Image (cartoon, rainbow, N blue to C red):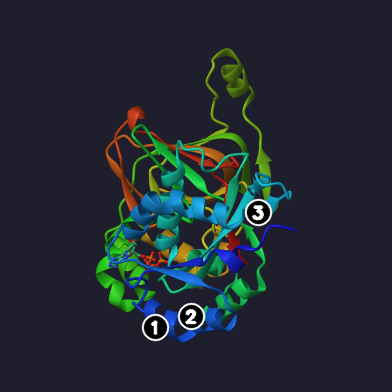
Amino acid sequence: MGILPTSDKFPLLVVLNPHSGRKQSLETWENTVKPALNNAKKPFRLIESNTQGYVISYFVDNIKPIITDLAQSLSIVTTSGAADGETIVYPTSAKLQIIVLGGDGTVHEIVNGILKGVEGTGFVTDVFRPEVELSVIPTGTGNAISTSLGVTSVQDAVDRFIAGKTVPLRLMSVTSQNSQLYTVVVNSYGLHCATVYDSEEFRHLGNDRFRQAAMKNVENLKQYEGKLSFFGPAQRYNRTSTSLVETVPAVSNIAQADNKNTAAATLTLPGPFTYLLISKQASLEPGFTPTPFAKTSDDWMDVLAVQNVGQAEIMQMFGSTATGTHVNLEHVEYIKAKVIELETPTQGRLCIDGEFLTIEAGPEGKIRFEVTSDPNIQIFHIFA
Ligand SMILES: Nc1ncnc2c1ncn2[C@@H]1O[C@H](COP(=O)(O)OP(=O)(O)OP(=O)(O)O)[C@@H](O)[C@H]1O
């Protein structure tokens, strides 16, 4: 007797955002994904998002009963023959499968809703730790996660789900004095954040909405004051050797760290920033690969930083992001790190997977980015 696979007893969840991309998720569901699941005899439960923020609230409110039902569906009752000889064997792990018909913002809401819903509870522990397996059907605008994994179409995503191979979806934790969130794709500051902010009004253009909003912001190019500090191990792209080279903390910094109880930065970038990304995905949309060394499953964050440049340099960078060769441009900094802090002298705006966060001015407003390693947070996997 063994533990039954989830699909035999507990339905997979299908999260559908009808507003994603060019609003074709429902059609894709009805025409392609639902027939494929029916064919494969996979029972499902449909969760349709009816407003912005619905998905996050749904999981905050429902993840505990979902995990309870999932665990119970996998429990095994054994009888010894005696009247009171019934024993229930509970599982120590289980797979919760979720198909996402939406874009990266919907994945962001699922991940943050689940983690918020189980925070401070005993629902995810060493004794019982569910694995959440996400199948992202690319029906958003950028579809960064799918694009970075090489998923080329809706059918390709469905095929990968049916094939069943998954890889870890590594998260970034984003902490300020009064908030804590998880990022699945990208944190941005400066031109990219302003572009995402302005792109909503061009949603009807599909992928082109980012291009339209980017051009608007390049025309009125601004510099964004801030200091970026890197802690612990870091690798910096070296244009001469065309490779990532380990950056060792300066000796004075090590001494400082030993004397005080606070770590000194391995490296700092003084800003101001024209363009700044802290990313877990190589591509943010098809044909746009700003952080080409980023990997969905590794334990690094990839930083693309462009400091204090003009329109010509930005356009030159955009011109080579399709191939990733912009990392060789003089004004481009590319760094891999595990812990990063951003401090701005005045109030600023940070974009986290399309969601916006206010950065308060000065040291109190500092934002800390870390790759998560806690096994009770790192429960997400993605069909690849
Ligand atoms: N019913 C709804 N009406 C309006 N907005 C919604 C609804 N359901 C969800 N949303 C919001 O839609 C936003 C965008 O979703 P999503 O990220 O999936 O698509 P996208 O922005 O087109 O794709 P991508 O993030 O891949 O570029 C999310 O911020 C989400 O909160």
**Mark 3 or mark 2, which is nearer to you?**
3
Give the amino acid at mark 3.
Ile
Q: In the displayed structure, would residue 306 be above or below residue 382?
A: above
Q: CA distance from mark 1 to mark 3?
A: 39 Å
Q: How many marks?
A: 3
Left or right, 358 with reference to 254: left
Residue marked by disc 1: 27
The residue drawn where x is 44% and y is 79% is 29
Q: In the displayed structure, would residue 253 be above or below residue 274?
A: above
On whether ligand 1 comes within 8 Å of the CB at mark 2, the answer is: no
Residue with the most extreme bottom position: 31
Q: Quadrant of ligand 1?
A: bottom left
User: Is residue 356 or residue 171 the one in the foreground?
Assistant: 171
Q: CA distance from mark 2 to mark 1?
A: 10 Å
Residue with the most extreme front position: 83
Mark 1 or mark 3, earlier in chain: 1
Question: Residue 354 location in percent, x, y?
Answer: 37, 57
Q: In the displayed structure, would residue 175 be above or below residue 112?
A: above
**Mark 1 or mark 3, which is nearer to you?**
3
Give the amino acid at mark 1.
Glu
Circle 2 packing at 10 Å, graded few (<14), some (14-19), many (20+), is some
The residue drawn where x is 68% and y is 57% is 3
User: Is residue 115 or residue 341 the one in the foreground?
Assistant: 115
Residue marked by disc 2: 34
Residue 19 visible within the image: yes
Question: Residue 54 location in percent, x, y?
Answer: 32, 59
Left or right, 131 with reference to 352: right
User: Is residue 240 or residue 357 the one in the foreground?
Assistant: 357
Circle 1 packing at 10 Å, graded few (<14), some (14-19), many (20+), is few
Circle 3 packing at 10 Å, graded few (<14), some (14-19), many (20+), is some
Residue marked by disc 3: 76
**On the image, which quarter does residue 155 sit in?**
bottom right
